[in-house]
Image: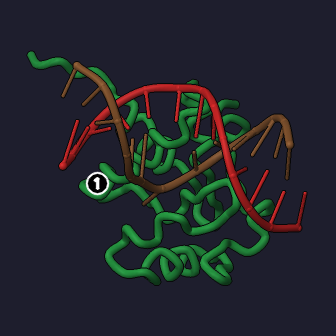
Chain colours: A green, B brown, C red
Amino acid sequence: MPNREVSFFENVWDVVRQVPKGRATTYGAIAKYLGSGLSARMVGWAMNAAHALPDVPAQRVVNRNGMLSGKAHFGSPTRMQELLVADGLAVADDTIVDFTKVFWDPATELAL
DNA sequence: TTATTGACGGGTA
DNA sequence: GTACCCGCCAATA
């Protein structure tokens, strides 16, 4: 049988899928949870590959500033914001409002 | 093969 | 509070 090793990307997608509605996480939080820590950029690459997946709410993944850094990758520049608003989040100026309140850290909430 | 870029983060000036 | 620099890992040119 072919190798069935879980890639770093699949691990990222798995965490993103577990992000509850109305919450959001950051690239660094996911990277740290996976153990890479400083490799937040790899999470971004994983998101880029996540385009082929149906259940990866990448809109809930933003940078540590709460800014919709990847909004440009959703086909439309406002698609990511609309998705977040549909999740019950408040978005203003391409940034999540009260991000510290909706922040969901897998290393704290998931790794329990 | 090496060099540059990339949906980032954190520290220092 | 803002600006700049370095670090991480992988993919692309």
Mark 1 crowd level (few <14, some 14–19, many ≥20, 10 Å Cα): few
Left or right: where does residue A61 sit relative to residue A2? right
Q: Quadrant of residue B13?
A: top right
Number of marks present in the image shown: 1
Is the N terminus of chain A in the top left, top right, bottom left or bottom right quadrant?
top left
Residue A34, how many percent across, how many down?
A: 54, 29
Percent of width and height locating residue C11: 25, 39
The subunit carrying tag 1 is A
Q: Position of residue A42 (x, y in %)?
A: 45, 39
Name the residue located 46 percent from the left edge and 83 percent from the top edge.
A78
User: Which amino acid, mark 1?
Assistant: Leu
Residue at coordinates 39% horizontally, 55% vertically from top-left? A56
Q: Dot 1 lies on which element?
A: loop
Residue sitting at x 49%, y 49%: A16
Which is more toward the observer, A46 or A109? A46
Q: Who's the residue at 58% across and 64% down the image?
A: A21
Res A97 → quadrant: bottom right
Decide if residue C10 is on the left or right side of residue A59.
Answer: left
Residue position marked by numbered label 1 in the rendering: A53
Nearer-the-camera pick, A74 or A4: A74
| Residue furthest left in the image | A1
Res. A61 image quadrant: bottom right
Is residue A52 placed above or below A99 in the rendered structure? above
Left or right: residue A25 versus residue A48 is right
Q: Quadrant of the C terminus of chain A?
A: top right
Q: Going by the image, does A7 lie left or right of A26?
A: left
Relative to A40, is A17 above or below?
below
Residue A73 appears at what percent x and percent y? 37, 67
Residue A45, above or below C10: below
